[in-house]
Image (cartoon, rainbow, N blue to C red):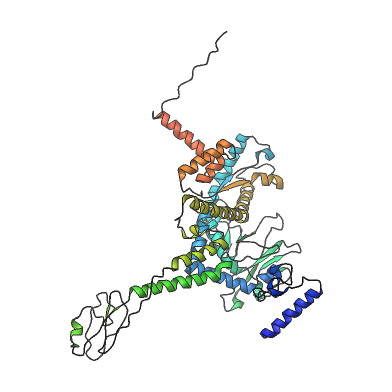
Amino acid sequence: MFGKTSIRDRMNKLAVSYLAAGGVKAQGGGGGVETRWRGASRLLRSMVSWVPGVGSPRRDLQRYERHMLVARSRDAMRNHLIGRAAVNRVRTSVVGTGLLCRPSVNAQALGLSEDQADTLNAQLEREFRLWSEDPRECDAEASSNFHQLQSLALVSALTGGDVFVTTPSIEREGAIFSTRLQLIETDRVSNPDGMPDTDNLIEGVAFDNNGAPTHVYVCSGYPYEQKIRTMLTWQKIPVFGAVTGRRRVLQIWCDRDRPGQKRGAPYLAPVLEPLQKLERYSSAELMAAVVSAMFTVFIKKTPEADPASLVQNPLVSMGGHDEADIPVPIPDEPGTVELGEGAVVDLAPGEEPAVVNPARPNAQFDPFFMAIAKEIGAALEQPVEEILMHYSSSYSAARAAMLQAWRYYEMRRWWLVCDFCQPAYELFIDEAVARGRIHLPGYADPAQRRAYTRAIWIGPARGAIDELKEARAAQARIDAGVSTETMETMAMSGESWEEVIQQRGREMERRRQLGLIPPTPKQAPVLQEQE
């Protein structure tokens, strides 16, 4: 709209106005700037074209931009190797085979002894397994158990920015409970009939004056896929129950970066541009290497050569596509020249071969690829060793990369527990108490309810590069008093120390019964010498 000269004049006028208002005077020679912070300068050549605006979370993540980010993130998940590797690595390390629930009631707040608390925890865990391990019990679609829903919810949140979960009550024949979880993709939560956002409605999420969500609008289909919008309907679902205040809608976030943000951006959003360029570069290099490997040998024919001898040469390709690629003589038409592995192209009389060296594979491909992959990994908080699953450095470097990645995995696991696992567990306990399957005195009191619904969520262990060194380090931490056997057991195997030690005791007792371990001799009492 404006030429370069007019833009420069406007920038100079802004700078003069700023200096007149008390700004720092620009010095000659390029050594100074008109602002106290160089990053805020509007005159430096490196910064003059970088003029972003200051906006609200809704403005900085507009509806149409977010939809494009979601679409490209899903495409990167489908077709880009690095993008798929980054998302799958998070899913495998954070969830794996599922986060296991270990009830841990607050015995002190409930006035229970340790034995009573252990008995109650065992009962809660037994009931929760009845619900979580059966798809017909926990899934509204009756297709995935609770651990599989964890994995699906995490991947959907990473690729879509967020995912919603409704908690309908559905009765089924042969089922014990009626609380179900229904995952709803981010696309289906939208404003009814395409109405614009308002001060209290952003992309299908309505909220009160304090910013707390009140209800969401869930479309019966995918509004951006359906061409005839009149066939779509929207259901208004409250986020909290009007009488009990129980959660009816859960929103699982990928990341929430700003206060007041109502919808999330995909995990791959900051790296989509370099990811696309790197994928194109990698594909181009791969194709160049394939073409180089299929380079053909050229033969020059003299004018005295007999054309009939062409048919007798098994190396000459006539354009056949069968596996044997047997040449077929065509009297009046020349053969079709195509690239092929080890093919020989027959040239016409007077033609000279042109030998071209494609210089493939490119020796600089791997260093450049790794440099960009490192930048992508840094933005995603995953070392490049974790994304590519390639540990070529020393033990210390490989372990440092793994530990750094696990800091992110544990943070992401904590988010998933807070947004999905723990609320779902509390909803299940509510129904179990209401049905009388579990007797919890004083459960109606919110403080008592929180004490009853405390739980520890155990995920896959991080593993070890050198298990002997890791075991010795764990023992050293226990001996030094900076760790416990419970913490080390959970970190190394992902299991509960109570279950491990009980199982170990049963195994040792069984060994003694079979005579594999001699009984421990009783020590004679020590007699004190009389003076």
Residue at the location (69% across, 40% down)? 109
Name the side, left or right, on which 274 lies relative to 117. left
* Residue 9 sits in quarter: bottom right
Looking at the image, the residue that sits furthest to the bottom is 332
Where's the C terminus, which quadrant?
Answer: top right
Residue 495 versus residue 163: which sits nearer the camera? 495
Question: Which of the 4 quarters of the picture holds residue 233?
Answer: bottom right
Residue 474, position in %: x, y? 52, 41
Q: Position of residue 54 (x, y in %)?
A: 71, 70
The total of numbered circles placed on residues is 0
Seen from the viewer's position, the closer of residues 9 and 417 is 9
At 51% from the left edge and 71% from the top edge, which residue is drawn?
276
Q: Please indicate, yes or no, whether residue 137 appears anywhere in the rendered image.
A: no
Quadrant for residue 310, please give it. bottom left
Figure check: 255 above or below 472 = below
Answer yes or no: is residue 166 visible.
yes
Q: Quadrant of the N terminus?
A: bottom right
What residue is drawn where x is 73% and y is 68%?
200
447 lies above or below 333 = above
Left/right of residue 33 with respect to residue 150 in the rendered view: right
Q: Position of residue 261 (x, y in %)?
A: 68, 64
Q: Where residue 228 appears, x then y in whole percent?
A: 58, 79
Q: Is residue 338 left or right of residue 105?
A: left
Pick out the residue farthest to the top.
Answer: 531
Q: Tell which residue pokes out farthest to the right in this image.
A: 21
Relative to the observer, which residue lies in front, 414 or 128?
414
Toward the viewer: 23 or 462?
23
